[in-house]
Image (cartoon, rainbow, N blue to C red):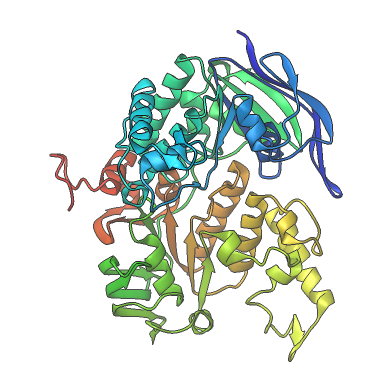
Amino acid sequence: MAQAVNMKNIVKRFGPVTANRGVDFSAEKGEVHALVGENGAGKSTLMNILYGLHSPDEGTIEVGGVPVVLTNPRVAIKHGIGMVHQHFKLVPSLTVAENIVLGSEPGNGLNFNRNVAFRQVRELSKTYDLDIDPGALVHDLPVGLRQRVEILKVLYRSVDVLILDEPTAVLTPQETEELFVNIRQLANSGKTVIFITHKLGEVMSVSDRVSIMRDGRIIKVTNTCDTSAEEIASDMVGRPVLFRVKKREAQPKQPILSVSKLVVDGSRGVEAVRGVGFEVRSGEIVGIAGVQGNGQDELIDALVGLRKPKAGKVTLNGHDITSCSPAIARDHGLSYIPADRMRDGLCLPASLWENAIAGHQRNPQLSRGPVLNIKECIRFTQELIDKFDIRGGSASTPSKALSGGNQQKLVAAREMSRNGEFIIADQPSRGVDIGAIEFMHNRLIAMRDEGTAILLVSADLDEILSVSDRILVLYKGEVVGEVPGAHASKDAIGRLMAGIRDEGGEQVV
């Protein structure tokens, strides 16, 4: 099979950190190629080089056998290479067609030919069996269809190589299956699909070959049919990995968090949480499953004090915290791993130690009155670095220098070390490698066994099923089902996530 892209001896340095160390990577025309590795292994850097977001310090790139210099994404697209990022880059107020043609609009001069754009999008979606309404507004679309728009946006620019970064991070199981069908159809049509993922089940389901990265190098390339998820995981982290955490049955005690008839408005003034009520008890993990955009963000914002509820009541350790500040909620025993580590979890220009002590700064061990004990702060941070295997720098390194997964580890380390009675873990393993996921899950279980009440919010059903003792499913701002963790199935939870309440296919409205 002919090579679509060939990267030779790629080296990329960021200051003292070498992200890629002489990487050789190739993908063939018409194949689905998975790229896997631990956080900080160099996967995203390598693909960002292929897409023109970074320039290599050393090495060469060939596209279709021809040497190229990819100085920016526009040049990469010109050479037939496109990328769909994990965080979608769409304009919600525009239509599907307007988003897809944005920057390459049909028409004369400043005159946008809307009819031609709609016709082109219909033809494109039909060609690749990615059915979608060109006139639909993006903000009205479910997440799975928004991703379809992103893929069509790249295909509209006639790319031959499509890079997908964590493509199923926010999809239901059913949407994931649909995406896999689309990926296979793209490959069958001659396109090359490269996808970065931490979900090894996906690698086994849809890829033809897999490249495994460790410490900035590709250590193994193999046909997917000749390996297993267990073998890939072991190659990634250098040791055997457990895919489902071992835990004893929970022994829940008194309620720590109580939520009653909670109503929360979204940013547009429309109710995003509609009369939700539940409890989380000491010594249990309650998982909230749901596709992103069904009220999870607004619910968590209300619980931690970032958004004022419209109605209802929230009680933590017997204290009414319904409209209190985050500081007061933390004083009453709340720890919080936010879903958006870059917006809510870290100050990226600040050092690791400055971020690590946030919320701990009044600890007498770390400060005397208003004066921080810098030596102790650095020692405390180094303990977290060692315990949570945070890679990419020392306690004095700016947090922005870490990979996304290692930034997530830093936030989790800080919050899990607070020893509070209640912790909200919102998408704790998003963008985190299989070894770090195993560590985090085991740590959550250990905290549960020590009596901590834990609310786990995740769009990853494997995570929900592996860790939760009880599972609540949120759909359009309401709890549409509760399932004991021990008896939950991916299919049943996935149906509830899609708003289907029973086997007869009744849709929740």
Counting the numbered discs, the total is 0
Residue 389 seen in the figure = yes
Residue 202 lies, in percent from the top left, at 48, 31
Q: As displayed, is residue 199 above or below residue 400? A: above
Q: As displayed, is residue 91 above or below residue 58? A: below
Residue at the spot 55% in from the left edge and 40% down from the top edge: 242
Picture quarter with the N terminus: top right
Q: Is residue 60 left or right of residue 482?
A: right
| Residue nearer the viewer, 294 or 500 | 294
Residue at the spot 44% in from the left edge and 84% down from the top edge: 324
Q: As displayed, is residue 224 above or below residue 388? A: above
In the image, farthest residue toward the top: 1
Q: As displayed, is residue 67 above or below residue 232? A: above
Choose top left, top right, bottom left or bottom right for residue 265.
Answer: bottom left
Q: Is residue 116 left or right of residue 29?
A: left
Residue 177 lies, in percent from the top left, at 37, 31
Residue 254 seen in the figure = no
Q: Is residue 508 left or right of residue 71?
A: left
In the image, farthest residue toward the right: 16
Residue 473 lies, in percent from the top left, at 30, 54
Choose top left, top right, bottom left or bottom right for residue 492.
Answer: top left
Residue 153 lies, in percent from the top left, at 47, 35
| Residue nearer the viewer, 197 or 149 | 149
| Residue nearer the viewer, 407 or 317 | 407
